[in-house]
Structure formats: structure tokens, C-alpha cells
Amino acid sequence: MRLVVLANEQLKEELLSTGINDSCKVDWINSSKEFSSYTDADAVIDLLFEYNGYESAHLTDLLKRPVFVNSMIKTIVEIGLPVIRINAWPGFLKRNIAETSCNDEVSKKEAEKILGLLNRKTEWVPDIKGFISTRVVSMIINEAYFTLQENVSTKEEIDIAMKLGTNYPYGPFEWSKKIGLKNIAALLTELSLTEKRYQPADLLLKEAKEQ
């Protein structure tokens, strides 16, 4: 199995964190333009699809094989191509479970095989914006910012309280640093267009703009 993966250094490190099966060869690229040089690859993984705002046009010629994209906000329907969405926000890609969405049963089987070579189990979720785990974490971070802007406590104290009280690996502000506050703000803003409970805190939006 030969994979071609578009990633930055952080996401490359996270993808490799669970190891790779010996039967799998990975070619790493830095730009979407390089995909055209790997037409013989068995699968394509574009971990920078969302982060760099690429249009989907560069993926069209690759669809004879499974194509994974890191798209947290755009759904498969909105992308307009039969791709496989994967949750590759920083921090989430380290897990041995891949939160994934796909609208085709044949592609699902192929995806499970490929992710298995990356030592990950596949968790199929609906094709919704933000998947599930990132919606939950984003809301926790948002509530922490509401608490902070009301001067209830400090960032450090809120992080400590959440870790001790819920046994989370990170506090909400620690999570926001790992994920990137701009990513959190973008997802919450998008979700709030149809569900007001996702309305981001003013302080969260302010800090996101300052980054």
C-alpha cells in the first residue's frame, strides 16, 4: 500500500504517533500541486485541506482512489466530491481512533483498511460540521471563555479544575492552544449560524483575532 500525504510537521508527527504497518509506504508532500506526481498512489490523505483553504479542484483527478481530507467545517455534500472526511485537528490525530465520515459503503471498507495500516480504528460518524468530539470540546472551551469573561476565575484555575474534576487530559485553555483558537472560533461561528447555542464568547473571538 502506497499513500501520499500532504501535511505540515505537526500533523505529520501526530499521524506517525501510532506507528505505521510495515506494508505501508508513505510519500510526504508539502503542497497540493505535488499530488499530480503521485498518480500511482493507492490512497491520498490531505491533512491541510482545511487549514490552507484549498479549493477541492486539486483532488478531482485523484478520485480513482480513496481520498481523505481534513475538513472540519465543510461537509462532503458541500465539498461536492466523494471524499472521506477525517478529524485531523491538532491533538485529535494522535488518537488510535479516527473520527471519520463517508457517504459510500465501498469507500468505507477501503478507508478502514487504510486507517488500519496507520494503526487506527475507524469511528464512523454522520457527515456534520465539526464531527462529534470536536463539537463537544469546542463547547467546553467556549463555556470556559464565558466563565473567564465574567471574571469567575483565571485560565489556570479553570484548567486545573477541569482536569481534576473530570479527569480530562487537558484543561479547556490548554486544548485551545493545541487546537488553535482560530479553528475553534471558525467552527463555533459556523455552527452558530443554525444553532445559537454555539454562539462563541466575545472574549474567545477577541483572542482568536489577536493570534
Image (cartoon, rainbow, N blue to C red):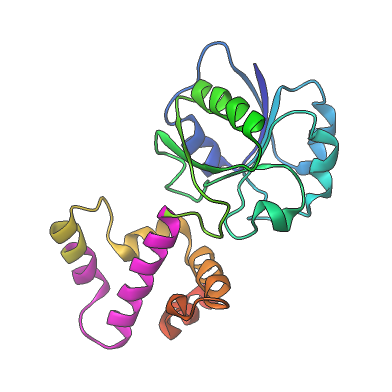
Percent of width and height locating residue 193: 58, 78
- Regarding residue 81, the answer to whether it shows in the image is yes
Dividing the picture into quadrants, the one containing residue 155 is: bottom left
Q: Is residue 53 visible?
A: no
- The image quarter in which residue 69 lies: top right
Q: Residue 96 appears at what percent x and percent y?
A: 40, 33
Q: Specify whether residue 136 is painted magenta.
A: yes
Quadrant placement of the N terminus: top right
Main SS of residues in magenta: helix
Q: Residue at coordinates 83% horizontally, 41% vertically from top-left?
A: 60
Q: Nearer the viewer, residue 52 or 132?
A: 132
Residue visible at 45% across and 29% down in the picture: 120
The answer to which of 13 and 125 lies nearer the viewer is: 125
Q: Is residue 90 above or below residue 67?
A: below
Q: Is residue 124 above or below residue 2?
A: below
Q: Position of residue 25 (x, y in %)?
A: 62, 17
Looking at the image, is 13 positioned above or below residue 91? above
Point out the stretch of residues depicted in magenta.
Answer: 133-160
